């Protein structure tokens, strides 16, 4: 047997690709953009999405297979047409609340909480999604509220050093 192990450097474990986020919008989710509601999988860097602060440019999109069970928010469970259709989110995706839930549960006028903390077993529950499901993180220059199927969700933010290569 050779002293050199295939796929390892100096006997160390091989580097695994790490995803920064465990959040995301599941494929098929419509996001409000300047061009109208578009499926998240059709968006590219440079597209502009509507946020509570106005239109913002998508700096980067991270896509990955969802390894956890998604959370299903049934149509209309967060208010009239919120969401507009059944919405699947990654379990740690932050949902922005500014209704009675924020005041009663969290004691604040508005709050961003992971969708798993909103599960009630009837209208927000673990979802069974057929097949392999991709999730997309829309990275903006600053974290903000974007609209997915009419639900306010938090965007991802680029890491602080992401533009380091541009200065060189």
Image: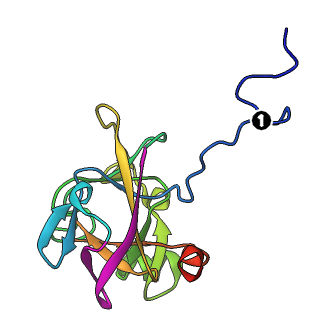
Q: Residue at x 33, y 36 (%)?
A: 128
Where does residue 152 sit, x and y in percent of width and height? 32, 74
Q: Give the range drawn in magenta.
A: 46-65
If the image is split into quadrants, where does the C terminus sit? bottom right
Q: In this view, does 145 lie to the left or right of 43?
A: right
Residue 2 in the image: above or below residue 84:
above
Is 125 situated above or below 130? below
Residue at the far right in the pictured view: 3
x and y percent of residue 139 in the render? 42, 70
Identify the residue shown where x is 88% and y is 19%: 3
Report the residue that reaches farthest toward the front.
168
Q: Is the magenta stretch mostly helix, strand or loop?
A: strand
Depth check: 70 or 77 in front?
Answer: 70
Task: Provide the secondary structure element on which disc 1 rests.
Answer: loop
User: Residue 43: within the magenta?
Assistant: no
Which quadrant is the N terminus positioned in?
A: top right
Q: Nearer the viewer, residue 29 or 71?
A: 29
Q: Quadrant of residue 96?
A: bottom left
As displayed, is residue 94 above or below residue 74?
Answer: below
Residue farthest left in this picture:
36
Q: Mark 1 points at which residue?
A: 13
């Amino acid at each position: 047997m050779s002293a050199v192990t295939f796929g390892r450097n100096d006997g160390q474990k091989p580097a695994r690709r790490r995803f920064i986020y465990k959040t995301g919008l599941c494929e098929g989710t419509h996001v409000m953009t300047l061009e109208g509601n578009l499926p998240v999988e059709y968006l590219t860097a440079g597209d502009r999405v509507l946020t509570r602060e106005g239109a913002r440019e998508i700096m980067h999109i991270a896509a990955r297979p969802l390894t956890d069970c998604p959370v299903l928010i049934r149509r209309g469970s967060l208010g009239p047409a919120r969401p507009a259709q059944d919405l699947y989110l990654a379990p740690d995706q932050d949902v922005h609340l500014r209704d009675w839930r924020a005041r009663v549960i969290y004691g604040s006028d508005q709050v961003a909480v992971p969708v798993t903390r909103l599960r009630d077993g009837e209208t927000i529950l673990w979802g069974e999604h057929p097949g392999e499901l991709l999730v997309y993180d829309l990275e903006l220059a600053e974290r903000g509220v974007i609209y997915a199927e009419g639900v306010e969700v938090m965007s991802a933010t680029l890491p602080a050093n992401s533009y380091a290569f541009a200065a060189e």
